[in-house]
Image (cartoon, rainbow, N blue to C red):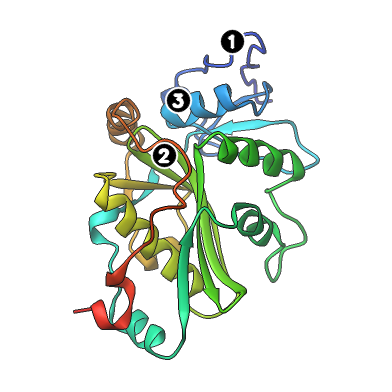
Amino acid sequence: MIRLPLLDTAKPEHFPDPRKALDEPNGLLAFGGDLSPRRLLAAYAQGIFPWFNEDEPLLWWSPDPRCVFHTAALKPNRSLRRRLAQVSWRITVDHAFGDVVKACAAPRPGQSGTWIVPAMVDAYTRLHLLGHAHSVEVWEQERLVGGIYGIAVGRLFCGESMFSRESGGSRVALTALAQLLRRWDFPWIDAQVTNAHLLQLGAVEYPRPQFLRTVSQLAHLPGQPGLWREFTPLAQIAPSGGH
């Protein structure tokens, strides 16, 4: 029988030590609490994130190893530049956060449901309005063909989910996000749980102790608060800017 710590509703910043998360299931740390902005920001600053299905209690995780993108390494490769040469796409930031989250929440082929449940949608929408959650959108005229969203804490970006409606849509959004973050000296995009697709896109794995040490440093650096709508990525992602 699994015994998990129950979070104290009166102490939204307090979490168990993430180094004590379970080995099986990998990274399960605690349950309960809420999805208030204070608790969510405190969780991400400690390398912890919520992940649960609609019929489950609120669960908190910190897996080992941890999946990370280096923003300096995420650049358009030859196949992506070739794809961009075939389409007329434009990129925006924080122009359609709700639409990106909704698209990410739609069940994928072979899936019957989604972990982006209504409570999660509401919580991240609140964080967006407060200037902590952000999205990158990829458009073909007025149609949204790809996107990514996540949370900025200090100088760490925690990626939550991305989607594609056209081939390359999510990769363009991820690459654009990385280029924007590089401009502000954000070295990492936390991709949370490893899978083959993320590794194929260029993610790497870090042992949890090393990940947590770096997160502790990045989360306390001055970040880029507020909405990011005025910032446009990025000439380098267009075919004419590739090398």
Residue 115 numbered mark, or none? none
Q: Is residue 41 left or right of residue 4?
A: left
| Nearest to viewer (mark 3 / mark 1) | 1
Q: In this view, does 31 lie to the left or right of 131?
A: right
Q: Quadrant of residue 59?
A: top right
Residue most extreme to the front: 230
Circle 2 SS class: loop
Q: Quadrant of the N terminus?
A: top right
Residue 64 numbered mark, or none? 2
Against 33, residue 186 (above or below) is below
Residue beneath label 3, please? 18
**Label located before the other in sequence (3 or 1):** 1
Query: How far separated are the C-alphas under marks 2 and 1?
Result: 26 Å
| Nearest to viewer (mark 2 / mark 1) | 1
Number of other residues with Cα within 10 Å of mark 1, as a class: few under 14, some 14 to 19, many 20 or more: few
Query: How far separated are the C-alphas under marks 3 and 2?
Result: 10 Å
Percent x, y for residue 178? 33, 57
At label 2, which amino acid type do we have?
A: Asp
At 36% from the left and 35% from the top, the residue drawn is: 208
At label 1, which amino acid type do we have?
A: Lys
Q: In which quarter of the image is the C terminus?
A: bottom left
Q: In which quarter of the image is residue 198?
A: bottom left
Q: Are marks 3 and 1 in contact (CB under 8 Å)?
A: no
**Label located before the other in sequence (3 or 2):** 3
Q: Nearer the viewer, residue 46 or 169?
A: 169
Residue 11 numbered mark, or none? 1
Circle 3 SS class: helix
Percent x, y for residue 50? 59, 35
